[in-house]
Image: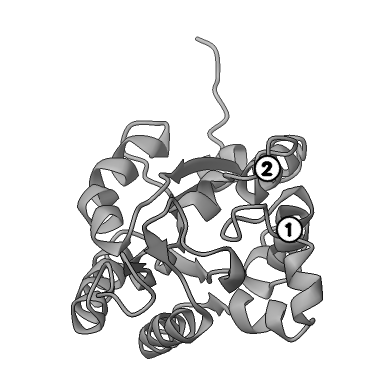
């Protein structure tokens, strides 16, 4: 009989990570690198020491309610082996909820109080599954609105929804990377040079900057 050395799955396989959210997860606007999640996936896949696997589960246009609706069905099949589930969820969602419909002072896609309730539900359900971290939204170019002749995004609403997300994460001890404030602190000219012509999505340079911000962030940096 051949002897088999049992190696813990965590050592052999590395972490299983899912990235859930909207177009910022999907990488829309970057036909060169595929966005920051794709670049991180390639980086981890090429590192034989870590063995981490990263699944991009971003869907353009998703808000918190849509991510909540698909959370568990996206989570459960991606442990890769029987009786194994993902170790970490990376969220990035909320900017689509903040947009106003039809005109600059139109109603939000998701009313603020409803957004807060949906977000709390999403975070609490996710924490029952595994560890959670949250990457915040990038600031938009207000002069390019409306997006798709319908959606008006602005910094004031972005800030309000971003702060609600940041506070909800803090209450639950979920690490939150405040990209909105971080990018604006570098100057609006710097931001505009890293946005696509639609004023909403990062371009290749924007996603490269976002990737570096994520890599420098302690919750991700410690993963190797």
Q: Which mark is residue 23?
A: none
Q: Is residue 8 visible?
A: no
77 displayed left or right of 139: left
Give the x, y percent position of residue 95. 43, 67
In the rendered image, the quadrant that contains the C terminus is bottom right
Mark 2 / mark 1, whichever is N-terminal: 2
- Residue extending furthest top? 1
Give the x, y percent position of residue 46. 76, 35
94 displayed left or right of 17: left
For label 2, the residue is 30
Decide which of 150, 7 is in the foreground and name it: 150
112 displayed left or right of 202: left
In the image, residue 25 sits, relative to residue 160, either above or below, namely above
For label 1, the residue is 206
Residue located at (30% from left, 55% from top): 67
Residue located at (55% from left, 48% from top): 15
Q: Residues within 10 Å of mark 1 (few under 14, many from 20)?
A: many
In the image, residue 185 sits, relative to residue 97, either above or below, namely below
The secondary structure type at the circle numbered 2 is: loop
Distance of label 2 from label 1 (alpha carbons):
9 Å
The secondary structure type at the circle numbered 1 is: helix
53 displayed left or right of 113: right
Q: How many marks?
A: 2
Q: Is residue 73 visible?
A: yes
Give the x, y percent position of residue 156. 48, 86
Residue located at (32% from left, 35% from top): 77
Decide which of 223, 55 is in the foreground and name it: 55
Question: Marks 1 and 2: in contact by CB < 8 Å?
Answer: yes
In the image, residue 196 sits, relative to residue 44, either above or below, namely below
Decide which of 147, 21 is in the foreground and name it: 147
């Amino acid at each position: 009989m051949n002897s088999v050395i049992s190696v813990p799955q965590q050592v052999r396989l590395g972490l299983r990570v899912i990235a859930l959210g909207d177009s910022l997860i999907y990488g829309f606007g970057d036909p060169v690198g595929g966005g920051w999640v794709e670049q991180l996936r390639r980086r981890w896949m090429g590192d034989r020491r870590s063995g981490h696997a990263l699944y991009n589960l971003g869907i353009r246009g998703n808000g918190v309610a849509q991510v909540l609706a698909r959370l568990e069905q996206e989570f459960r099949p991606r442990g890769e082996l029987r009786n194994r589930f993902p170790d970490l969820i990376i969220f990035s969602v909320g900017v689509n909820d903040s947009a106003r419909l039809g005109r600059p002072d139109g109603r939000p896609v998701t009313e603020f109080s409803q957004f807060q309730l949906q977000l709390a539900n999403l975070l609490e359900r996710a924490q029952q599954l595994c560890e959670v971290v949250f990457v915040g939204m990038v600031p938009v170019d207000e002069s390019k609105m409306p997006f798709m002749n319908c959606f008006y995004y602005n910094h004031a609403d972005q800030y309000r929804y971003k702060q609600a997300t940041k506070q909800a994460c803090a209450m639950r001890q979920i690490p939150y990377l405040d990209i909105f404030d971080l990018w604006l602190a570098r100057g609006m000219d710097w931001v505009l040079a890293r946005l696509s012509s639609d004023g909403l999505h990062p371009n290749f340079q924007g996603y490269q900057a976002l990737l570096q911000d994520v890599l420098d962030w302690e919750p991700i940096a410690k993963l190797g």
